[in-house]
Amino acid sequence: MRIFLPMDSAAKALGAEDVAAALRAAAPEAEIIRTGTRGMIWLEPLIEIERDGVRYGFGPVEPDDVAGILDGTSPKALGPVEELDWMKRQTRLTFARVGVIDPLSLREYEAHGGLTGLRRALAMTGQEIVDTVKASGLRGRGGAGFPTGIKWQTVHDADGPQKYIICNADEGDSGTFADRMLMEGDPFTLIEGMAIAGVGVGATRGYVYLRSEYPDAITVMTSAVEIARAAGVLGKDVLGSGKAFDMEIRKGAGAYVCGEETSLLNSLEGKRGVVRAKPPLPALQGFLGRPTVVNNVISLATVPVILEKGAQHYADFGLGRSRGTVTLQIAGNVSRGGLFETAFGISLGEVVMDLGGGTRSGRPVKAVQVGGPLGAYLSVTEFDTPLGYEELDAAGGLIGHAGLTVFDDSTDMLGKARFAMEFCAVESCGKCTPCRIGAVRGVETIDRIAEGDTAALPLLADLCETMQDGSLCALGGFTPFPVMSAVTRFPDDFARHKEAAE
């Protein structure tokens, strides 16, 4: 008997280790394989039992449920996991192996298509690799959505005795967890993507900057790098090609601003994590002053499937200039939270009401914040908005890392606006005045509005404009998105404070 049980952090937080102990006690002869999560967090811990090559699911499982699952009487039987609506409706490219294989089995990774992309890349020139990534339409999945291939081209063309590939794994946005799930559930795809990037642009060294709050991801990634190096996937002679690429894991201290690429580079160099002014661009003078590719986890982890299946296969998904798939992270007050990978273009309403099942509280949806704590709040009147870079921008939002946080009608949006300003004030690196001082003044101004002084609203708008135009990085520059979207879309929440004061 083969039993699959996630060792993902979310599953463990929901009791997966106690379920594993119960399984070992009840079925000592069974082979228990620890995997990543399938992304259906509301069903975790999720047990899968393989019968005739088909994996049947049970969840959410508690230790007392194990006996019934093993004897076939459990009411928590879900049927074949691949036939569940949540799974059938996805287009899993980047996350195809997550929840399916043992994350640290290189043999299983290869059996499910792993290393095919790297082997193809090793037979190509660097320019051919870069051209393939450009043709795929892949854009940065960390926030700005900059075309990945153009960034690679800049580093490819730059002169330098040493070039670097830096993976930004400092996933600090609230309500986002795709990077962590990928690293815990399929670490070799990130390693393979970084190796392809290295071969493509001529970089022989790579680093994963991983936040300290992800201890399980750190453990899995560290082990995976050691396994890959021992198998010749990393090192001086990658898969016998004569080309070199090696990498290591570096742990960040947890500053939110270190998710910004230049702050990350400073931290990686052992300096204070503060923003650098641009130019020069990191692609030309990045880590230690050398040409550097800085990409998000999902961006780099998607490269292997592009090289494996071809640029056109990937580009065939999506809409407009948003090509390929987006890894939606559905969180907050929602019935079915988790990770759902699909082509760009799905509407916001379908994600929240259909996939997410509406609010967990059962109350009407009031707002959805898209893109993490710096993303705009959208109302139910905008549920027809397609999820794409330009499409969301036209609606006054940003897709960011594709996290969606749902709020019901009991939420005070003035309080959410204040939280955004306070978050910026706490997390600011202090390098530039608009962010350092503006966020503090923003909290004070919103507090005045909360006391009934709605005359301060124009002042808040002016302050947000200054922060947006004058900040050195996205922390100060994007904080106005949640603040002003709350003001403009939910004005009643600001006016009623004046009424209460009167």
Image (tube, grey):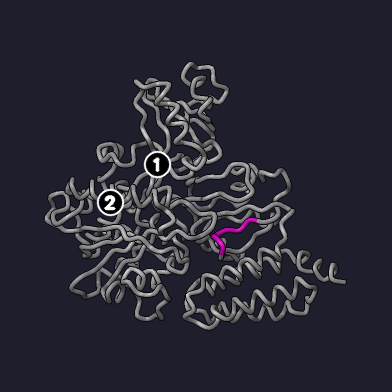
The range drawn in magenta is 368-373
Q: Quadrant of the N terminus?
A: top left
The residues bearing labels 1 and 2 have C-alpha atoms spaced at a distance of: 15 Å
Q: Amino acid at mark 2?
A: Glu
Residue wearing tag 2: 192
Residue wearing tag 1: 98
Task: Please indicate whether residue 210 sits to the left or right of residue 331 in the image.
Answer: left
Residue sitting at x 48%, y 28%? 57
Classify mark 1: helix, strand or loop.
loop
Task: Please indicate whether residue 129 sits to the left or right of residue 355 in the image.
Answer: left
Residue 501: image location, x then y, percent: 84, 71
Is residue 202 visible in the rendered structure shown here? yes
Q: Is residue 293 magenta?
A: no
Residue 252: image location, x then y, percent: 38, 63
Residue sitting at x 61%, y 71%? 421
Q: Quadrant of the C terminus?
A: bottom right
Q: Quadrant of residue 419?
A: bottom right
Between residue 282 and residue 269, name the one nearer to us.
269
